[in-house]
Image (spheres, grey):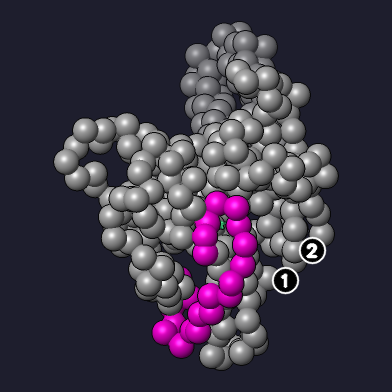
Amino acid sequence: MNDLAPLAELVDSARAEFDAADTPAALENAKARYLGKAGRITELLKALGALPVEEKKSRGAQINVAKQQVEALLTARREALAQAELQAQLRAEALDVTLPGRQRGTGGLHPVSRTIERIEAIFGSMGFDVADGPEIETDWFNFTALNSPENHPARSMQDTFYVDLKDAEGRWLNLRTHTSPMQVRYARAHARRHAGAEVMPEIRVIAPGRTYRVDSDATHSPMFHQCEGLWIGENVSFKDLKVVFTDFCRAFFETDELELRFRPSFFPFTEPSAEIDIAFASGPLKGKWLEVAGSGQVHPNVVRNFGLDPERHIGFAFGMGPDRLTMLRYGVNDLRLFFEGDLRFLSQFR
Ligand code: PHE
């Protein structure tokens, strides 16, 4: 009898079922149907027991060949499935190395902070110390010590932000309207520190910081910046102010072709007083006088409030606007841009 045909058919159907199994679990189920305890090949092998010895041998050999073929098919299919799974995983986890990376934005200094750092560096190179002090100020430091009369308009509510708190003298505190109170704070501390010395070291300081006034338009912001300067010694004159401020402006704007003009003016705390104007020799603002600072010889009454003798200690002070300097340096025409916090504007200065 020819028993090989059914065995070939059995191998073919195993191949078809293995190929149809598209997951390892389905493949193991298909395997069980052939090689499992009640699988078709196992059943055939079990049935051998009933055959006569001679037939058992040859039939057993045929079944074993078929069994080996089925096992080979199974192994091949297992490998194929494992390969397919690996490929699918590689595809799923593929990295597109040509995509731009996700970046963490780096911050940058605010343009006005950059200007203040520049001011500090330039005056630092001329031997000036840097000081800072309170933005909430007493009436005495902000006005009285600076020789401002009781009825000065700057003291009115229209010009000054008052804080709902009183100082020890029962006067309303204010948001400092300028950095000039720092002249007094710094000079008094300096005078105290060197009290009794034969010769007091010179006072040479700048004090940058925030200042506040009731004012708001394209060139005024209720919060703005000032930088005070003070140089007091035994022989410091207006000439020194001119030299120092001219050197500063040339270093700041990186040009020697810059003109300065000291225009007579008035401040209660200086006498004589001058507004300092500059004019560029080229560029879009060429030849235009631009006001950059107030200045003057420190008034004797103010020197007295420093705790010093105005007969012996003289010098000058100035107050400039870092916001204005930043606008001029970068060509910005609306001051409010600095304080709106729009990153499209600010990130240009990084
Ligand atoms: N404090 C003055 C202002 O705010 C500027 C100034 C400072 C003038 C020092 C003279 C001396 O306008």
Q: Residue at x 36, y 65 (%)?
A: 237
Q: Are marks 1 and 2 in contact (CB under 8 Å)?
A: yes
Determine which quarter of the picture holds residue 198.
top left
Residues packed near mark 1 inside 10 Å, few (<14), some (14 to 19) or many (20 plus): few
For label 1, being within 8 Å of ligand 1 is answered: no
Q: Residue at x 53, y 22 (%)?
A: 60
Residue 258: x percent and y percent? Answer: 49, 84
Q: Residue at x 82, y 59 (%)?
A: 217
Percent position of residue 31, x then y: 64, 24
Identify the main secondary structure in magenta. Answer: strand
Name the residue beneath numbered marker 1: 333
What amino acid is found at the position of numbered circle 2 in the picture?
Answer: Ala
Marker disc for residue 218:
2
- Magenta span contains residue 61: no
| Magenta region | 252-272
Vertical position of residue 28 compared to residue 275: above or below: above
